[in-house]
Image: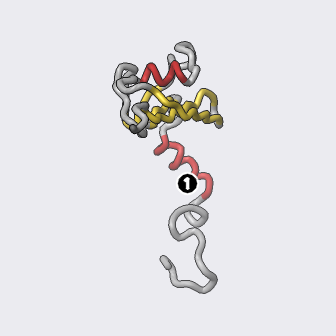
Amino acid sequence: MADASLRVTVSASLQPGQVREWELRLPPGATVSHALEAAGLQQADLVALALGIWGRSAEPGDVLRDGDRVECCRALTVDPKIARRQRFASQGARAAGLFARRRPGAKQGY
């Protein structure tokens, strides 16, 4: 008879540059909140985090399926588009972009 438990991964980024993962086995019908409790994450740790399953927004009461990955992500501090524009402005047009590294003697754009 096959194992009736769910295999779930919980991934959390509680601090910048730190990602922790837990491989869990949960009973059928387990929710996101059950997975977070099984991983040992406290409710106080999760207040400012966004929850998701495979990159899609999730709620604590959402039911999990076998193989799901529950993600706890911190909010972005800088808009990625603005950060890219700032990097481009500081590097200049020749040092950034698709054609930044050309072979010596190659045609422009290749």
Q: Is residue 94 above or below residue 31?
A: below
Q: Which residue is mark 1?
A: 88
Helix, strand or loop at label 1? It is helix
Query: How many residues crowd around disc 1 within 10 Å: few (fewer than 14), some, or many (20 or more)?
Result: some
Given residues 22 and 86, the one toward you in this image is 22
Relative to 20, 110 lies left or right: left
Residue that appears at 40% across and 20% down: 60
| Image x and y of residue 80, in percent | 49, 43
Q: Position of residue 76 (x, y in %)?
A: 51, 33
User: Does 96 appear above or below 81?
Assistant: below
Location of residue 10 in the rendering, given as x and y in whole percent from the top left corner: 51, 32
Image quadrant where one finds the N terminus: top left
Please say whether residue 85 is visible from this viewpoint.
Answer: yes
Q: Residue at x 55, y 54 (%)?
A: 88
Instruction: Residue at 55% x, 35% y: name it.
Output: 23
* Residue found at the very far top of the displayed protein: 44
| Kind of residue indicated by mark 1 | Phe
Residue 32, image quadrant: top left
Does residue 44 lie above or below 63 as drawn? above
| Residue 55 visible in the displayed image | no
Residue 87 point in image, percent of width and height: 58, 50
